[in-house]
Image (cartoon, rainbow, N blue to C red):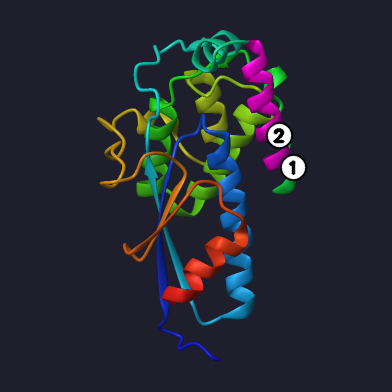
Amino acid sequence: MPVAPSASVQIDVYFDLICPWCWIGKKHLDTARRQLAERQPGVQVQLRWHSVQLIPQTPPQGWPYQAFYEHRLGGPEAVRARRAQVQAAAARAGLTIHHERIAVFPNTWRAHRLLAFAAQQHPKQHESLLNALFEAFFVQGLDIGDDQVLASLAQAHGVDSAEAEALDAPPIWALPGGASGVPLFVFNQREAVSGAQPPEALLAAGQSLA
């Protein structure tokens, strides 16, 4: 059934850059958005990205990546099992995560501040910069808490990281009431989809509210 040109869906996405499920969830969201555009071309989709710092107590220099997860999950066997689960989910989304390249579990505050600045001053570059940050961490193994890494990524996307430093803080870190983790997708401030759900689940939520 044709959709009126004025139909719209607002999607609020809550995420952190060190969460592999957030990258997987974003890839599924990208797929769902393409499918929605094909099936209901009259629908306008507005995305709003909300930074959530999962481990705010991470020091500015970060922690050793492997040691952090062994402590968090209970040892190397538990880490291997969790990574196998993540790798399988990433592969289904068409992504490859290289845990073996990651040396530092970073503090993501500066990266989120950079994204907040891009959203304000360079909105057309915001999503490409977001993708680049995910790829820098999960594919290249770069420390996205490092100022030089962030400056290089920002410059490649036409964003001045020095200007971003003038922001006192990124948007508020809090999740909506009742939410317990990321990624979280909230459609038109009414329907929430939690976790890295497959594209069809996100598409169904979008279509039901269009």
Residue topped by disc 1: 91
Q: Is residue 204 left or right of residue 87?
A: left
Circle 1 — which element? helix
Q: Position of residue 97 (x, y in %)?
A: 70, 32
Q: Amino acid at mark 1?
A: Ala
Q: Amino acid at mark 2?
A: Gln
Circle 2 — which element? helix
| Distance CA(mark 2)–CA(mark 1) | 6 Å
Query: Is residue 9 among the parts visible in the rendering?
Result: yes
Foreground of the two, 11 or 123: 11
Q: Is residue 85 magenta?
A: yes
Near mark 1 (Cα within 10 A), the count class, few <14, some 14-19 or many ≥20, is: few
Foreground of the two, 184 or 59: 184
Quadrant housing residue 52: top left
Near mark 2 (Cα within 10 A), the count class, few <14, some 14-19 or many ≥20, is: some
Query: Is residue 97 among the parts visible in the rendering?
Result: no
Foreground of the two, 131 or 152: 131
Name the residue at 52% across, 24% down. Answer: 144
Residue topped by disc 2: 87
Q: Position of residue 8 (x, y in %)?
A: 41, 75
Confirm or deny contact between disc 2 and disc 1 (CB under 8 A): yes
Vertical arrangement, residue 89 with respect to residue 29, above or below: above
Name the residue at 59% across, 74% down. Answer: 37
**Which region shows up in magenta?**
76-90
Q: Is residue 75 magenta?
A: no
- Please tell me how many numbered marks the rendered image carries: 2
